[in-house]
């Protein structure tokens, strides 16, 4: 297992290096170069030269890359020209929001998807099966921001059950020591703040969790169907085991292998791909941060944010691979 | 290897006679013809029996027809402004003159939705063509040459896949400047690694199959086996992926437009942009957001249904 883990980690090194080159070149490829992105298009030639000098942009590219990587490895992602804050601090402030949102979405998708897929597969052709098939198709066809609007309109505007945007009520003055609002409420002995933060997570969580829900339902159904046809399941049923026992011990456990992979891959995507959902719900996480960086042409944030999220994505995928190796020993030998 | 890439060719099992006894020349001539005709008919037969394929094809056909004939179908020009009943914050809903009502600028929503199909169609097709052709070239290089070429191409693919696709598309579109062209290039580029990996995987498994082995042992040159037999037989998953990629391209394009990265001209009736504009009037005019949302959903659903049915028709092992 250790050798498997180490090999997977080593495979990551060239990927991450390549990625850093890509992101580095990305900013250098901007029309007018990073100095124009930093100062705007009306900057005087003197000012531009000054910035080139300060940031070492007049040095050869390989040298610039080494300096850049040196800084990145020390956790320095540069300073955002829009907010005048270090990009690292901005990310540290917003990433907890994204984690909270992604967790909500995964809990929703797994909590609904696995039981639904299981029931659908155990009763193929039933109304539950048909409804889940149609539902998953609609789930992957609807654009996440359109679904976001729909949820917002029905549950926030019309029914008024849940808040429509933000991470907490505007009237809330809760302390946030960790940046995880739900956790912060519990830590500071303010359960109503936790409850408030939770309510703000429901709608964006459902919107974001719908596509993973569709995938998890489909893959659970397919996996359960496949396992149900295995010889050992037939044997278990033939020797008189109760259906519920067979379902739990033989079918579900073996069907969970592919489902785990999908959950992991979707989690990686959710942590990095919530740009649209966060924009619809004005949810102040990494996604809306990057979306506004696009508008402000804030390339320091784009460069640092994309690199950071890609690293998170790659690491989550690595964890999935490792988890898979733990669950299914056959993977390790490949 | 799992997934469509590893699927063995169903025609292998069903092909009568096989390769035994044929000369190299006969093999060269006979194989593609039998593959094309027999297999094509079989796939069409399977598709016609699949309800989801038929429904998908109907939706896709509707979408394409509307896109192509929008000027004939639409009652108004997408930029025609009718200010008769417009008051700030209150726009007439569906009526006889305006089937789906008018937007905040007094433009006919129905006509804009119809013209929007045009933009989605072009964006989808062009971006998938970009992604599929570049991806096919890369996959062909990797699959045909193997060795270090394969190594370099696959590492490149790994790096590209390390960035989540929407994020990569946002970055590329932002870099290229806000326009429809950059959206198409951005979505095309993020599709490249998917096609490359798929084709390479399919070629690797096809290369091991009996007909390739037979052709090689009959003295057919390696490049000829690769280009004339292995490559064409590996295209099925690429075609399926192309159909599914059209669905994601339409959704992603709408997402980019929603973020303000698409066409900058407000006169262009682009569905994602229409949805984004409708956000301002969500409380008073929710229907304005509903129509473009539905339009995106229906077209995407069509491509998904057809793509999935095509995948099943091409690979009977997936049918249960």
Image (cartoon, rainbow, N blue to C red):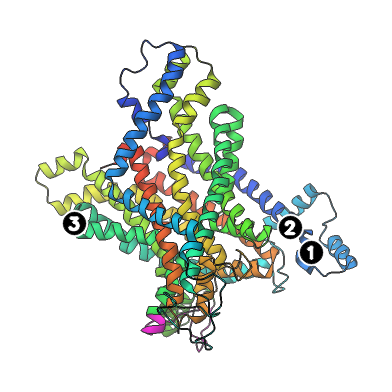
Tag 2 and tag 1, C-beta contact below 8 Å: yes
- In the rendered image, residue A158 lying in the magenta stretch gets the answer yes
**Left or right, A25 with reference to A281:** right
Q: In this view, does A284 lie above or below B304?
A: below
Q: Mark on residue A36?
A: 1
- In the rendered image, residue A307 lying in the magenta stretch gets the answer no
Q: In this view, does B97 lie above or below A263?
A: below
Relative to the observer, which residue lies in front, B278 or A325?
Answer: B278
> Magenta region: which residues?
A155-176
**Left or right, A300 with reference to A7:** right
Task: Give the residue number, with chain letter if any, for mark 3.
Answer: A126
Relative to the observer, which residue lies in front, B78 or A217?
Answer: B78
Instruction: Give the residue furthest to the right.
Output: A46
Q: Can residue A64 be seen in this view?
A: yes
Q: Quick one: label 2 or label 3, which is nearer the N terminus?
A: 2
Task: Give the residue number, with chain letter if any, for mark 2.
Answer: A30
**Do discs 2 and 1 share a chain?**
yes
Distance from Cα at disc 2 to Cα at disc 3: 56 Å
Q: Quick one: label 2 or label 1, which is nearer the N terminus?
A: 2
Q: Position of residue B245 (x, y in %)?
A: 48, 50
Within-10-Å neighbours for mark 2: few <14, some 14–19, many 20+: some
Element on which disc 3 rests: loop
Query: Residue A70 is drawn in which quadrant?
Result: bottom right
> Chain for mark 1?
A
> Residue at horizontal 36%, vertical 38%?
B314
Dominant SS type (magenta): loop
> Residue at horizontal 53%, vertical 31%?
B143
Query: Residue B133 is drawn in which quadrant?
Result: top right
> Chain for mark 3?
A
Quarter placement of the N terminus of chain A: top left
**Do discs 1 and 3 share a chain?**
yes
């Amino acid at each position: 297992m250790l050798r498997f883990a180490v090999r997977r980690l080593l495979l990551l090194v060239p990927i991450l290096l390549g990625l850093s080159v890509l992101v580095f070149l990305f900013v250098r490829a901007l029309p007018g170069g990073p100095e124009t992105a930093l100062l705007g298009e009306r900057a005087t030639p003197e000012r531009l030269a000054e910035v080139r000098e300060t940031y070492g942009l007049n040095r050869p590219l390989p040298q610039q890359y080494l300096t850049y990587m040196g800084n990145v490895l020390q956790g320095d992602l540069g300073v955002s020209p829009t907010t005048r804050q270090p990009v690292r601090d901005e990310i540290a402030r917003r990433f907890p929001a994204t984690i909270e949102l992604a967790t909500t979405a995964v809990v929703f998708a797994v909590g609904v998807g696995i039981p639904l897929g299981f029931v659908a597969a155990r009763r193929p052709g039933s109304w539950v099966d048909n409804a889940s098939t149609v539902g998953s198709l609609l789930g992957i066809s609807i654009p996440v921001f359109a679904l976001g609007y729909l949820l917002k309109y029905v549950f926030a505007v019309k029914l008024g059950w849940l808040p429509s945007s933000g991470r907490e009520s505007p009237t809330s003055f809760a302390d946030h020591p960790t940046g995880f609002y739900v956790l912060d409420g519990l830590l500071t002995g303010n359960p109503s703040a936790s409850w408030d933060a939770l309510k703000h997570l429901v709608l964006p969580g459902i919107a974001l969790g719908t596509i993973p829900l569709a995938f998890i339902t489909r893959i659970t159904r397919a996996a359960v169907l496949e396992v149900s046809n295995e010889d050992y399941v037939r044997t278990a049923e033939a020797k008189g085991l109760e259906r519920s026992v067979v379902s739990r011990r033989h079918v579900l456990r073996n069907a969970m292998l592919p489902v785990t992979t999908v959950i992991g891959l979707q989690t990686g995507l959710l942590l990095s791909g919530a740009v649209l959902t966060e924009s619809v719900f004005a949810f102040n996480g990494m996604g809306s941060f990057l979306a506004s960086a696009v508008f402000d042409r804030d390339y320091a944030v784009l460069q640092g944010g994309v690199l950071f999220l890609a690293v998170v994505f790659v690491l989550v995928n690595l964890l999935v691979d490792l988890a898979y190796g733990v669950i299914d020993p056959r993977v390790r030998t490949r | 290897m799992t997934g469509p890439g590893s699927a063995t060719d169903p025609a292998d099992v069903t092909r009568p006679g096989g390769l035994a006894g044929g000369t190299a020349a006969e093999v060269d001539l006979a194989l593609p013809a039998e593959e094309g005709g027999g297999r094509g008919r079989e796939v069409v037969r399977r598709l016609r029996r699949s309800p989801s394929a038929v429904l998908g094809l109907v939706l896709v056909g509707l979408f394409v027809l509307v896109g192509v004939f929008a000027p004939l179908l639409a009652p108004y020009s997408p930029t025609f402004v009718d200010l008769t009943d417009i008051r700030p914050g209150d726009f007439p809903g569906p009526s006889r003159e305006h089937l789906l009502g008018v937007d905040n600028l007094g433009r006919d929503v129905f006509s804009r939705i119809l013209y929007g199909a045009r933009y989605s169609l072009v964006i989808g097709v062009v971006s998938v063509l970009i992604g599929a052709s570049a991806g096919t070239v890369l996959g062909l290089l990797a699959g045909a040459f193997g060795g270090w070429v394969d190594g370099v191409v696959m590492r490149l693919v790994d790096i590209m896949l390390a960035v989540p696709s929407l994020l990569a598309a946002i970055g590329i579109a932002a870099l290229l400047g806000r326009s429809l062209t950059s959206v198409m290039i951005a979505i095309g580029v993020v599709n490249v690694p998917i096609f490359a990996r798929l084709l390479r995987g399919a070629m690797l498994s096809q290369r091991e199959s009996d007909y390739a082995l037979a052709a090689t042992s009959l003295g057919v040159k390696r490049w000829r086996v690769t280009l004339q037999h292995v490559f064409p037989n590996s295209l099925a998953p690429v075609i399926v992926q192309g159909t599914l990629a059209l669905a994601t391209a339409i959704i992603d394009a709408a997402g980019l437009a929603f973020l303000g990265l698409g066409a900058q001209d407000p006169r262009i009736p682009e569905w994602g942009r229409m949805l984004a504009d409708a956000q301002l009037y969500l409380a008073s005019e929710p229907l304005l957001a509903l129509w473009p949302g539905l339009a995106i959903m229906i077209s995407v659903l069509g491509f998904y249904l057809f793509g999935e049915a095509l995948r099943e028709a091409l690979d009977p092992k997936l049918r249960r």
